[in-house]
Amino acid sequence: MSTSLVSAPTRPAGPARPTDPSGVERLSRTAPAGPAGPAAAPSAARTRTSPVEPVEVTIGTGVEATGPLQVLGVPGQVNLDYAATAPCARAAADAVAELLPWYGSVHRGAGALSRRSTLAYERARQDVGDFLGVRPDDSVVFTRNTTDALNLLARALPPGTRVVTFAAEHHANLLPWPTGAVRLPVPDSAGAAVRAVDAALRELRRGSGGEAPILVAVTGASNVTGECWPIADLARIAHRHDARIALDAAQLAPHAELDVTALAVDYVAVSGHKLYAPFGIGVLAGRADWLDAAPPYLAGGGATLGVGPATHDVRWVDGPGRHEAGTPNLLGAVALAAVCNALAEADRAALYADEQALLARLRSGLAGLPDVVELRTFAVDAPRVGIVSFVVAGRDSAEVAADLAQHWQIGLRDGLFCAHPLARRLLTEAADRSGRRDLPPTALRASIGLGSTAAHVDRLLAALASLATPR
Ligand SMILES: Cc1ncc(COP(=O)(O)O)c(C=O)c1O
C-alpha cells in the first residue's frame, strides 16, 4: 500500500494566475527542481541510516526568499521558530500598505472605499481557496487561525458525528472534538497510521449501524517532528468507510504544495501567521453542506438574512458569511491572499528542495553532537518538513533556549509544543532509543522556512556544541 502524502492524481491546471503586480522578475533557479511535495524527499535525507550517523548533506545556502517572498526580520536575530509563527513576507506587508488608504467597511457600505474593501475581501477568499485547491462548491471561511477553524468545524458537525484522531495531534486538533471522539495511539509509521484508521472506522461502522457521520481529523505535518502524514491514503480509507477527513495543514501548507481536491480531503484548516502573513487570520475550507446546515459559529450582523421581532426569529445566510458574523479581518485576509498568490507563482519544488537541503544539514549537525537526541515518531528517513525537535541530555530545555537567545541571538521554542501527549511519548522513546537516563522532561524545537540560511543552521549547531563546554 502506498503511503505517500501526494499520491493523489494531479488536478488539471486551473485558470492562469494573474501576473505579479509588483513586476519583480523572479530569479532563475539553479537548484534542480525535484518533484513537488513532501513525498519527494531528496536523496540527502534518504541516505540517513542511523540517528547517530551524520547524513550526507547537500550543501545549500538556504531557502530563497526574494521579491514578494522576501521575509521581514531584524538583522542579527536568528529566527528558528517558524513553526510557531513565521516571519511576515513582503507580499503581505505590501498588500496591506496598498490597501490601507482604501480601508473601509466590508459588506456594509455603498461608498467607493467600502466597495473596494468588499471586493478585496472577496477576492482574497477566492485567491486563498485557489491556493488550497478547493472544489468550486466548497466554502472558504475566514477564521482567526487554525484553532479557530477546527473549533468552527467541531461546532458544525452534524449531531452524533464520531471523530477519529490520533494522540499525535496538536491540541488544536485534539481538544475541540465532541465527547466520544476516538483518539488512536501514536503510530510508528505512515502505514500503521493508515491501518489504524481503517480498523477504527470498520469498528465504528459496525458499532453505529453504519449510519452516523464520521470525521477523521489529522495533521498534514507534525508540529513536533515535522514528519508528514499519509494524507492521500488516509483520505482514501476514510471515504471507503463513507467518512470525511479534515486536514490540519497549519504546518504543511507553509512548506509544501497543497491541493485539497487532489488529496480528496473534505476540510482543510490553516493559520496565516504560520504562512508568512500576519496574525489574526486563518481559514477553514471544505464541504459546504455541513457548514450551511450548522448554527452560525458566531451569531450577529453579517450572518443573517433577516431578523424578526420575536427573540429567536432569525434566518441565517448560507455560505461563508454564516460563520463570519461581525466586521471581518480585511487586512488579514488580503495579506494572506497576497502570500498565497506569491507562493503559487513561485517554484515550490525548488523551495522545497532548498528547505530539505537545509533540514538535512541541521539534522546531520544535530546527530553529530554527542548529547543531542532527536525526537521522532516515524523512521529516521521519513519525509518531513523543516521542523526538528530534540533534547540536550543533562540540560534543561528552557535553560538551553534562554541561553541560545541571550548569548547567540537565536530564537527557538522549548516545551511540549501544545502537543503534550505526543511530546511526552517521544521524550520517553528518545530516552529508550538513546539509552540516556538524563533527558529533560521538555524539548527544544528548531524550525525553518523562507529566508532561513545555512549560516543560521550553523550558528545553532555551534551554539549547541558550545553548551557541552562549560562557560
Ligand atoms: C499542527 C498545528 N495545528 C494547529 C495549530 C494551531 O495553530 P494556531 O495557534 O495558529 O491556531 C498549530 C500551532 O502551532 C499547529 O502546529
Image: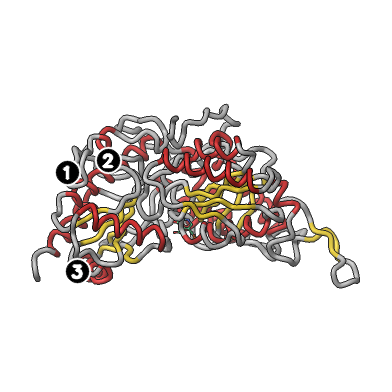
Say what amino acid the circle numbered 3 marks. Answer: His
- Judged by depth in the image, the label closer to the viewer, 1 or 3, is 1
Q: Secondary structure at mark 1?
A: loop
Quarter of the picture containing the C terminus is: bottom left
Give the residue at mark 3. Answer: 407
Q: Horizontally, is 283 left or right of 436 in the view?
A: right
Label 3: how many Cα within 10 Å (few below 14, some 14–19, many 20+): few
Mark 3 residue's CB less than 8 Å from ligand 1? no
Using the rendered view, name the quadrant where residue 310 is placed: bottom right
Kindly report the distance in space between the C-alpha atoms of the residues bearing marks 2 and 3: 27 Å
Q: Earlier in the sequence, mark 1 or mark 3?
A: 1
Colour approach in the figure: secondary structure
* Residue at 9% from the left image edge and 69% from the top image edge: 470
Q: Earlier in the sequence, mark 1 or mark 2?
A: 1
Asked if the residue at tag 3 contacts the one at tag 1, i.e. Cβ–Cβ closer than 8 Å, the answer is: no
The location of residue 363, given as percent across then percent down, is 24, 48
Give the residue at mark 2. Answer: 357
Give the residue at mark 1. Answer: 54
